[in-house]
Amino acid sequence: MKTALEALIRAHSFTVVAVILVTAAPTGCSEERKAPRSLTAELEVVKRVEGEGNEVDTADVRGADTGVGELINIPIEVIRINDFIHMATGLANTYLVSTSEGNVLVDTGFAFQARQQYKALREIDDGPVTHILLPQGQHDDIGGLGRWKDSDTKIIMTRTTMEYMRWREKISGWLLNHFAVLYNWSTQLLAVKDLLYPYESITPDILVEDHAGYSFEQGGIRFEVIALPGAEGTNSTGLWLPDHKILFCGGGFVGPHFPMWPNLGTVRGDRNRLVEPYLDSLNKVIALQPEILLPGQEVAVVGKEKIEEQLILIRDALQYVHDEVIEGMNDGKDVYQLMQEIELPRRVAHLSQSHGRVDWVIRNMVYEYGGWFQYRSTSELYPYHVSDVYADIIEIAGVKPVLAKAEVRLQADEPVHALLLVEMALESEPENPDVLRAQIQVLTTLLERSRATTNNFSEIAWLETEISKAEDMLD
């Protein structure tokens, strides 16, 4: 069986440091805050959950050959971070911080893995859980909440996270329909009993105002809750251990890859993520100089210099694109010009776009700063799309000439232009075998291009879905 570490390495193509610098276990004395530092220990798998995997079938996962797609198949193991922190792996990590005065939990896992993660961590430490931090309020935060929380446990959330959860519950039907396209295994969760699914909002016991933060001390460890509007949401939250230089950054600050181009404009659907607040968060964390970064997914990132270098890489790439977009908007360029023209400069071009893409973030950024009306055409003002007249164009031009022109575009290495023409024919004759075959040919070309370049999960999952639908119609 593939271990969680091996799966993470395969999924994200990074090197795990086997020996890490960690801090000593807490002394339990609140007056002695200078805990010993710089002890070494093995990054060790201390518990492996054999024969108990996901409670859903993941045999036919869309985007399975991407790093993001592979995350769902990471087995559940408990990895020792240091003497008092253990991590349960899976699609999303759950962290248990053990202290002499009770335990602090960060994230509770995804619903279909929470039972196994809970059981595995409880074999490490079955002491009372005094606090649970929900860093973002998404599905991978709350899945195991019912198992971990008892009458004395305090749930900690920021105000923006609480408000985000209420918004997400309100629009959950719309979101689930979108999730089902990209994450095709997600619909199975509706049939699994004892799961917090599709979604329930939560009112915390400790509500943290984002601008103020929240601090507490337990068992000789100081904890600081800080707002970190991030790559995966404006409501992202971190838990900082200042004496140990450890930052739990949740799944929202850096996303499922580190480092990665931020997914500020999602395909699956979510509230907009804002550029300048994320730049501020990156600078805030750089200034903290963490020595261990514990994300919501992947393994621990260890080493102050390594963490700083990778955070600066993300910041500089995003700052460059931000400045180029603002300059282009002020020069009168529209969103499509900017999406086509702006690329990452060579010094940061290696940054992964396997979750977000630069051109998608540019589109989101233009709408963030300038709104929905692009001053491109008068028809933008009205509740109709250009596709509403595709059938009229096909009636005039005919399907065969349009498909022939699409083939010309495809042969000229212009598959998106070819797709626009094929979509015109599809609107008029959606069951025409020639049109469906042309669609499959164009989509397959785009799929191969994506795999060879960004290997972007959302793009690949969408293309696989559309190809499958077209093939089913041909059968």
Image: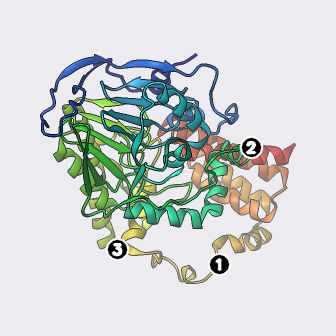
Tell me if residue 361 can be seen.
yes
Which element carries disc 3, helix, strand or loop? loop
Q: Report which residue position mark 2 lands on.
A: 468
Q: Quadrant of the C terminus?
A: top right
Where does residue 403 sit, x and y in percent of width and height?
Answer: 73, 55
Q: Report which residue position mark 3 lands on.
A: 332
How much space separates mark 1 and mark 3, taking CA atoms?
Answer: 25 Å
Q: Report which residue position mark 1 lands on.
A: 384
Q: Is residue 183 above or below residue 212?
A: above
Q: Is residue 332 above or below residue 86?
A: below
Q: Amino acid at mark 1?
A: Tyr
Instruction: Give the residue at the far right of this rendering.
Output: 475
Which element carries disc 1, helix, strand or loop? loop
Q: Residue at x 50, y 52 (%)?
A: 138
* Disc with the residue nearer the chain's start (1 vs 3): 3
The image's colouring method is: rainbow
* Disc with the residue nearer the chain's start (2 vs 1): 1
